[in-house]
Amino acid sequence: MRRNDSVSRTAGFITFLLLQGIRVAYSYGHGLFYEHALAAAGAPEQTFVITEGESLDRLAKDLEEAGLIDNRQAFVLQAHLYELEIEPGSYTLSPSMTVVDIIEHLSQEGTKNKELA
């Protein structure tokens, strides 16, 4: 009988770990791909400056610190998927923009800044 109790406890523990792993994986994936803004529409815009030679990781950190994104990894992954080319300049962004909105804005305005330079 003791052997059955031990096997049952081990199986229960493995099931618990498996369910926790599934929960964490879902939460992580949801954070990466769920489109959301940090504020409701009409949130105040702010000026955001990108410096020459700024890396994508640094850009993500700065955006997070400015309260424009809440997941650096999601931003970096999506920026790669959208093939964002970082151009130095001053950008007007808002927390009511989604990550994709921010990437598209940086891309479009970055192209304009590059053409004007």
Image (cartoon, helix red, strand yellow):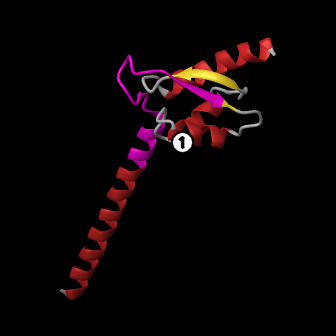
Where does residue 108 sit, x and y in percent of width and height?
Answer: 65, 15
Task: Locate the C terminus and report the quarter of the image it occupies.
Answer: top right
Residue segment shown in magenta: 25-49
Where does residue 110 sit, x and y in percent of width and height?
Answer: 70, 20
The type of residue carrying mark 1 is Arg
User: What residue is rendered at 37% in x and 27% in y?
Assistant: 39
User: Which of the two residues, 103 or 33, is positioned nearer the viewer here?
Assistant: 103
User: What residue is rendered at 61% in x and 22% in y?
Assistant: 91
User: Which of the two residues, 49 or 6, is positioned nearer the viewer here?
Assistant: 49
Q: Which residue is mark 1?
A: 72
User: What residue is rendered at 53% in x and 23% in y?
Assistant: 93
Q: Determine the image quadrant of residue 17.
A: bottom left
Where does residue 24 sit, x and y in percent of width and height?
Answer: 39, 52
**Horizontal side, residue 97 vs residue 104: left or right:** left
* Magenta stretch: includes residue 37: yes
Where does residue 72 sit, x and y in percent of width and height?
Answer: 54, 42
Task: Locate the N terminus and report the quarter of the image it occupies.
Answer: bottom left
Q: Determine the image quadrant of residue 50.
A: top right
The secondary element bearing badge 1 is classed as: helix
User: Which of the two residues, 81 or 38, is positioned nearer the viewer here?
Assistant: 38
Check disc 1: other Cα within 10 Å, few if <14, some if 14-19, many if 20+: many
**Horizontal side, residue 76 vs residue 71: left or right:** right
| Farthest residue, direction left | 1
Looking at the image, residue 70 lies above or below residue 16: above
Q: Determine the image quadrant of residue 107.
A: top right
| Farthest residue, direction bottom | 2
